[in-house]
Amino acid sequence: MNKLHLLIVLTICSLAAVGSEARHIQNDVARLCQPTPLSTIQKGINCSCSAHHSLQSIPRQNDWQKNGLVLTIRLHGCRDIGSIGKELSTYHDLKTLDIQGSGIKKLENGAMIFNINITTLIITNSKISRIEPNAFIGISKLRYLDLSGNKIDNLPVEAFKEIRTLQTLNLDGNKIDFIGKEIFVRLSSLQSLSLRGNKISTIDPDAFQNTLLLGEIFLDNNVITNLDFTSFVGLPELITLSVTNNKITKLTVPCEGNGVYDTNVDGNENCSPAKLILKILNMANNDMTVLSDKFIQAMPFIEYFDVSDNSLTYIGGNAISKLRNLKVLNISGNELISPNVEWVLPIRENGAGFESDLSNNPWICNCETAKYQAFILANGNNGMVASLNVECTPKSEKEYREYQQCLNPKGEETTSAATTTYGITSSELPTVRPAHDNISFELTTARPAHDNTSSELTTADDTLNQSEYYTNSILSAILILLCLVVIGFNIYFWKFRPQQQVYRDGRIIAEYIQSIRISRSHSPRSSPALSEASSGLLDTEGGPRENVV
């Protein structure tokens, strides 16, 4: 009897404990979660946890809502939720599960096997490091999967095999270092793939096999050094490829038939590169030095081409000139020294719809630069923007003279509107101004406006051209000659003039005194002082004394 009483007491205590826990969970849910009605029978739940109050697990539907269809669950900042457990199976109509900032460490096999209606799954900024092979089994309607901001370092071959309806996959901000051969092979509906901010260094050439609907791939902020376009050739819908902020030094494109073309190796000139459908290619902030014509030929449909902030010293111009669809070309921040007119020839096809940025390159003032600037001015009525212009600074007077000669081969005044060079009038040509304190020069080029078709040219004050230079030289020589003449006259008057002046003045004084004597002999009233003065100025023979001043 005593044993029966003890059993009854234990049963009652257990039921009380379960009920207390259930009430505690219900209190947490009531405090942290708010229902969000979508309609009269369709509802959602938003739970916002804090450092002091957090859910231990995903709440069951009965913990907060017994009636109606639950379509959305959002759990933000609930760090104590460590797994997706059986609680989720109580939501049979769930379509969106959004968990951010949780403590979930892995996606277990069959975790959502009963949630067959889920279309959007977001588990971000958590601690997931492992995806088990059958983690997504049962959710055959999933279209959007976001696992960014976790610690995933390896993608199992069979991780995504059960979600063939997936259209968008975001794996940004993980620790993935390799894209294997068959990881995405079952994702036949995939349209967008983002792998930004990982540690990817290698991509298998067959990594995207069978993803025939894939339209955009983002591989920014990784450590890729060799970008092999073989991985992308078999994708007929691939429009956008972004590989910014990597360490790319080598580009490889496949040849039609057999073989590949390495842009860093001479040879294989008979290779006809396989064509890609790419329209947007962004390779900014890498370490490339060369873009060959054959590489550019592999992208005949490109519209947006960005290779800014690399170390490019050469870009094939012939291939770019044939890109009839090109609308944006950004080659700023490289090591290019001579602009090529062929880089901007698509302006004739697209007019005002073409933009280019060639800034922040160490352009030198040579004939290629002059020819390019003249072409820009000549096509200003096509709506070319200011960023198409280039600026250069002559490093020596010789370079400056040669550059001026290229601007005006006939040697005429650059202000003469009658002379034309490269299809524009000389009055429109840019001029240079020498610095006052050194031999460096500053070039001011035209800045066509965006909103009109006329090109305006800003010229430097006090321009210096060849005619002015020769004129100034002649004037300087004349002034020097005049100075020499003046100095000669001064020397003459200083050395020879004083002695002649003494003898001439002495004769004049003697004649004057002689005339006074004659007049005194005829006048009885002659002055004694004058007589004494005259006797002092004349010697006994009547001639003038020596050393008389």
Image (tube, rainbow, N blue to C red):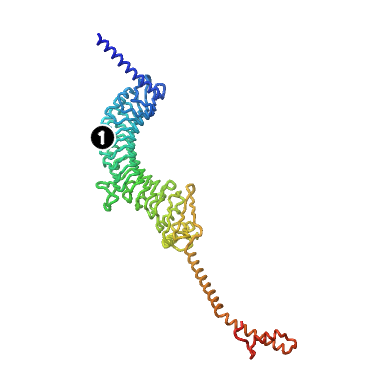
Give percent across and percent down for residue 246. Answer: 33, 44
Crowd rating for badge 1 (residues with CA inside 10 Å; few <14, some 14–19, many 20+): some
124 or 471, which is in the foreground? 124
Classify the position of the C terminus by image quarter.
bottom right
For mark 1, what is the residue? 156
Give percent across and percent down for residue 528. Answer: 71, 85
For the question of whether residue 488 can be seen, the reply is yes
> Residue shown at 45%/58% (left/top)?
441
Give percent across and percent down for residue 36. Answer: 41, 25
Answer above or below: position of 474 versus 462.
below
Quarter of the view holding residue 143 = top left
For the question of whether residue 301 can be seen, the reply is no
Q: Is residue 179 left or right of residue 338?
A: left
Q: Amino acid at mark 1?
A: Pro
317 or 200, which is in the foreground? 200
99 or 542, which is in the foreground? 542
Quarter of the view holding residue 182 = top left
Q: Is residue 509 left or right of residue 28?
A: right
Answer above or below: position of 70 versus 491.
above
Element under label 1? loop
Give percent across and percent down for residue 123. Answer: 34, 31
Count of all numbered marks drawn on residues in the image: 1
Q: Can you name the residue that lies furthest to the right here?
A: 524
Q: Can you name the residue that lies furthest to the bottom here?
A: 541
Classify the position of the N terminus by image quarter.
top left
